[in-house]
Amino acid sequence: MKNYILHKANTRGEANHGWLHSFHTFSFAGYRNDERNNFGNLRVLNDDTVAAGMGFGAHPHDNMEIISIPLSGDLAHKDSIGSQEIIKEGDIQVMSAGTGITHSEYNANKDKEVKFLQIWVFPNKFEVEPRYDQMTFPDVRNELVQIISPNQDDAGLWIHQDAWFHLGKVDSGFETNYEMKNPENGLYIFIIEGDVTIDEHVLNKRDAIGITNAESVSIKANSNAEILLMEVPMQIKY
């Protein structure tokens, strides 16, 4: 039998530092919720808005897979392995922190804010060589586009974890089934925009649902919507 956990948008942690307004799905920084520390190997899902010209100064990470998904605006990235890039809506950024990496993320514009999702996934390989990658994806509708997988030769970018992410911009009335890559994994679905029914559960903008013990999950858009699907192993080996 499938198991569901519903996380409504208004139950997330919130931090407003002026230059940064962030909503935390899972425990992060000053937000602590012992019932919401993670979903399997999905450790962080932050919904960040950064003011014009502001950003995160250089800071370190290790042994974590870090994915950034810009929603609007331009995000400037710089790191200790020589990467210096700008990502915008339609791009996906991946960092394997591995043995250690230092990076900064700044709003590249002085006249408008930048919005992006910051996602951390526990890796299945540790002390790897730090790595940075990004990709621009086609702007298509009514398709779940694979953006992350465990395989270097598969569609999208790859990370050190048996995880698959899909992103979809869909029209009202769109229906599909998501077939699990591994039925032992869990599926966490985050509604970026719009209203969507997942199995029998109605979700709205910034709501999320975690599903386990599933082989297939039904998706129906009740309005034009944008959805992020994250399939991750539930067993943490950290």
Image (cartoon, grey):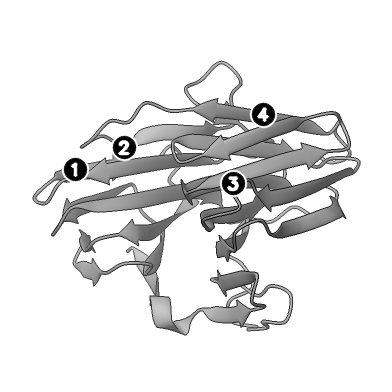
Of mark 4 and mark 2, the one earlier in the sequence is 4
227 vs 94: above or below: below
The one of 188 and 134 positioned closer to us in this rendering: 134
Mark 2 sits on what residue? 144
Of mark 1 and mark 2, the one earlier in the sequence is 2
Asked whether the beta carbons under mark 1 and mark 2 sit within 8 Å of each other, the answer is yes
Q: Is residue 30 left or right of residue 33?
A: right
| Measured Cα–Cα span from mark 4 to mark 2 | 21 Å
Asked whether the beta carbons under mark 4 and mark 2 sit within 8 Å of each other, the answer is no
Q: Is residue 96 left or right of residue 52?
A: right
Q: Is residue 128 left or right of residue 134?
A: right
Residue in view at x 50 percent, y 79 percent: 12
| Measured Cα–Cα span from mark 1 to mark 3 | 26 Å
| Measured Cα–Cα span from mark 4 to mark 1 | 30 Å
Disc 2 crowd, CA 10 A, few/some/many (<14, 14-19, 20+): some
Mark 1 sits on what residue? 176
Asked whether the beta carbons under mark 1 and mark 3 sit within 8 Å of each other, the answer is no
Which disc number belongs to residue 133?
A: 4
| Measured Cα–Cα span from mark 1 to mark 2 | 9 Å
Which disc number belongs to residue 68?
A: 3
Amino acid at the residue labelled 4: Asp
Q: Secondary structure at mark 1?
A: strand
Amino acid at the residue labelled 3: Ser
Amino acid at the residue labelled 1: Thr
Of mark 1 and mark 3, the one earlier in the sequence is 3
